[in-house]
């Protein structure tokens, strides 16, 4: 068996995602908790040359963070590296194939299974955005709960129904074959279903500016909750104008030595967060857009352009927190289904897409509101619609 090491922190949702992926593949690992251990934290940074958690090593070789692990797993490289062979019979035609395992996907799986349909979930992870949310206070019946804890409850409930799960697989294409809907993954797997529910949610947006990709994990981070403590007494810039950016600014105020909140225009987050940021020591720059992130081995600067006069200014920073919202995770469906300008899949009141037998639920569709409770409700509704479709196809 390979020696797998995972450096983690107790509050890090992406650490939980990495561990869940390894567990789903039946892999054992040694967890090195750096939460209150500065020696281990410095060891992690020295070994990986990165300032984000988790950091994963296989037989002493640095794999990177969760995104890196997910990528090599999705392409099949991890399986080839470890000599793992597929365990599920993918020649079977399932009644319902569900893309995504967030609140919409897991809810859809439970409802479809309760209708005595065979169900397979294919997803990069379990929980989606819900798994990276620090606190949820508006889910009916639960006054307050962390996102990862609510994910665990959803997953435990869904596991009662014998649902087949392919976790760590990235869907890259949809197609049809006779009366089947076919999902194709990056690793080359083809999964056949009589009906298909797309519940792939949304992903973090990127800045797409010079330096961002090269310095990802080396000062460029996308989760303040996960990586904020690694920037204690350092200089950080937070990019964004919504709730996540404002919350990151509040969280880093008093932890980092300097905090700048940079946005292209006015803030769009909740008013209570506006007030908290305005009452803090955070330096606010509105009307500026980032143009380049600087650094060699680590981030050491950020250049921004004043949208009013075009002047470019450079700030010395140790970290850039990208909090500019989400984009629908629908790339795999763009050639088959109608979407809006944001890539959200168009659905009708029954969550039907333009392709018969294919439904879309949760944040991946063009519904106006994006909430956990709505995603879960739409997952249930999509499963019931799929059941009705299948009954009338028999």
Image: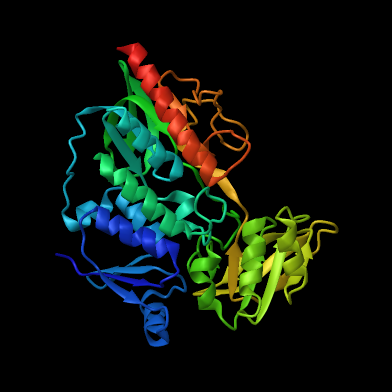
Along the line of sight, the residue nearer the viewer: 331 or 139: 139
Vertical relation: 250 (above or below) 182:
below
Q: Position of residue 32 (x, y in %)?
A: 32, 76
Q: Is residue 127 visible?
A: yes
Identified at 48% across, 27% down, the residue is 335
Instruction: Identify the image quadrant of residue 383.
Output: top left
What's the colour scheme?
rainbow
Q: Give the left or right position of residue 330, taking residue 164 as reference.
A: right
Q: Give the left or right position of residue 394, taking residue 208 as reference.
A: left
Identified at 71% across, 62% down, the residue is 273
Instruction: Identify the image quadrant of residue 237.
Output: bottom right
Q: Position of residue 268 (x, y in %)?
A: 73, 52
Along the line of sight, the residue nearer the viewer: 244 or 47: 244
Identified at 70% across, 57% down, the residue is 241
Identified at 30% across, 15% down, the residue is 178
Q: Position of residue 240 (x, y in %)?
A: 67, 58
Q: Give the left or right position of residue 121, taking residue 9 as reference.
A: left
Indicate the quadrant containing the C terminus: top left, top right, bottom left or bottom right. Answer: top left
User: Residue furthest toward the front?
Assistant: 141
Vertical relation: 13 (above or below) 87:
below
Q: Position of residue 53 (x, y in %)?
A: 42, 69
Q: Give the left or right position of residue 230, taking residue 294 as reference.
A: left
User: Residue furthest toward the right?
Assistant: 309
Indicate the quadrant containing the N terminus: top left, top right, bottom left or bottom right. Answer: bottom left
Vertical relation: 320 (above or below) 155:
below
User: Residue furthest toward the bottom?
Assistant: 39
Disc tally is: 0
Instruction: Identify the image quadrant of residue 249.
Output: bottom right
Along the line of sight, the residue nearer the viewer: 137 or 385: 137
Q: Is residue 330 visible?
A: no
């Amino acid at each position: 068996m390979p020696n797998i090491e995972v450096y983690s922190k107790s509050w890090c949702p992406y650490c939980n995602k990495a561990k869940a992926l390894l567990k789903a593949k039946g892999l054992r690992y040694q967890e090195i908790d750096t939460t209150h251990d500065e020696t281990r934290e410095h060891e992690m940074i020295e070994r990986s040359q990165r300032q984000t958690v988790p950091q994963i090593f296989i037989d002493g070789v640095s794999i990177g963070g969760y995104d890196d692990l997910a990528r090599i797993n999705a392409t099949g490289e991890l399986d080839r590296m470890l000599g793992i062979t597929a365990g599920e019979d993918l020649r079977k035609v399932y009644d319902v194939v569900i893309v995504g395992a967030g609140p919409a996907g897991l809810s859809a799986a439970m409802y479809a299974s309760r209708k005595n349909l065979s169900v397979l979930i294919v997803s990069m992870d379990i929980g989606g955005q819900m798994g990276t949310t620090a606190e949820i206070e508006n889910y009916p019946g639960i006054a307050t709960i962390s996102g990862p804890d609510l994910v665990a409850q959803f997953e435990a409930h869904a596991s009662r129904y014998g649902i087949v799960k392919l976790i760590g697989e990235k869907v890259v294409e949809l197609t049809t074959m006779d009366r089947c809907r076919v999902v194709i993954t990056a690793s080359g797997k083809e999964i056949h279903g009589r009906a298909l529910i797309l519940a792939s949610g949304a992903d973090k947006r990127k800045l797409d500016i010079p330096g961002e990709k090269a310095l990802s994990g080396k000062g460029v981070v996308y989760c303040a909750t996960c990586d904020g403590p690694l920037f204690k007494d350092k200089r950080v810039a937070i990019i964004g104008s919504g709730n996540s950016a404002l919350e990151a600014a509040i969280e880093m105020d008093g932890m980092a030595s300097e905090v700048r909140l940079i946005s292209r225009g006015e803030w769009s987050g909740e008013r209570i967060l506006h007030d908290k940021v305005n009452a803090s020591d955070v330096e606010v720059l509105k009307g500026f857009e980032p143009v380049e992130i600087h650094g060699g081995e680590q981030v050491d600067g950020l250049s921004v352009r004043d949208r009013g006069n075009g002047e470019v200014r450079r700030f010395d920073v140790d970290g850039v927190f990208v909090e500019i919202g989400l984009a629908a995770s629908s790339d795999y469906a763009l050639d088959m289904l109608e979407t809006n300008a944001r890539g959200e899949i168009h659905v009708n009141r029954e969550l039907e897409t333009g392709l018969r037998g294919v439904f879309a639920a949760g944040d991946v569709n063009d519904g106006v509101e994006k909430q956990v409770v709505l995603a879960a409700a739409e997952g249930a509704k999509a499963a019931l619609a799929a059941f009705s479709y299948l009954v009338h196809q028999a």
